[in-house]
Image: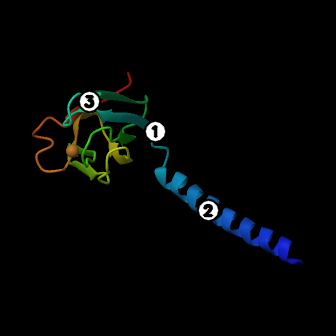
Amino acid sequence: MNARTMRRGAFTLIATAALGAAGMSALAAGGVPTATRTVTNGAGELSYKPAKLQVKIPKGKATIRVTLRYRNTGLTMHDVAVKGRGVAKVGREVAPGARTAVTAILKAGSYTYYCTIPGHEAGGMKGTLKVVKAR
Ligand SMILES: [Cu+2]
């Protein structure tokens, strides 16, 4: 085996290990459906656009894994978090121009997404996420 094939062998080993990890997480998900929505800042600094979101749980499922992506189009640091019905998940705080996300497994009901930076939610940086069941 020359140096080139040895390198290729090492690369294949790493790629296989990464695939293995991905396979594990897909398995851990256990068939929970997923939905992704994206928000940015709305008019003024302290708001999200859109301020209302809805996701639908497919028929026969009780929960949905919702990923809320946020692109900071504002002028200061912000984040995005989800709360309600016993859920409390917080995404990483990001600078203007950067992106972050928060993921939560949710049942049907109404949730709030908001910025955790003091004063921001009270100032209007919040929205309503409705999770409904398909019927
Ligand atoms: Cu904020």
Image quadrant of residue 61?
A: top left
Image quadrant of residue 131?
A: top left
Residue found at x 27% / y 48%: 79
In three-dimensional space, the C-alpha distance between marks 3 and 2, rounded to whole angstroms, equals 38 Å
Residue found at x 12% / y 50%: 118
Front residue of this view, candidates 76 and 62: 76
- Foreground tag (3 vs 1): 3
Q: What amino acid is found at the position of numbered circle 2 in the picture?
A: Ala
Residue on which disc 2 sits? 18
SS at badge 1: loop
Mark nearer the N terminus (1 vs 2): 2
Q: Is mark 1 within 8 Å of ligand 1?
A: no
Labelled pair 3, 1 in contact (Cβ < 8 Å): no
Q: What amino acid is found at the position of numbered circle 1 in the picture?
A: Pro
In three-dimensional space, the C-alpha distance between marks 3 and 1, rounded to whole angstroms, equals 28 Å
Labelled pair 1, 2 in contact (Cβ < 8 Å): no
Please provide percent x and percent y for residue 132: 31, 28
Image quarter where the N terminus lies is: bottom right
Residue on which disc 1 sits? 33
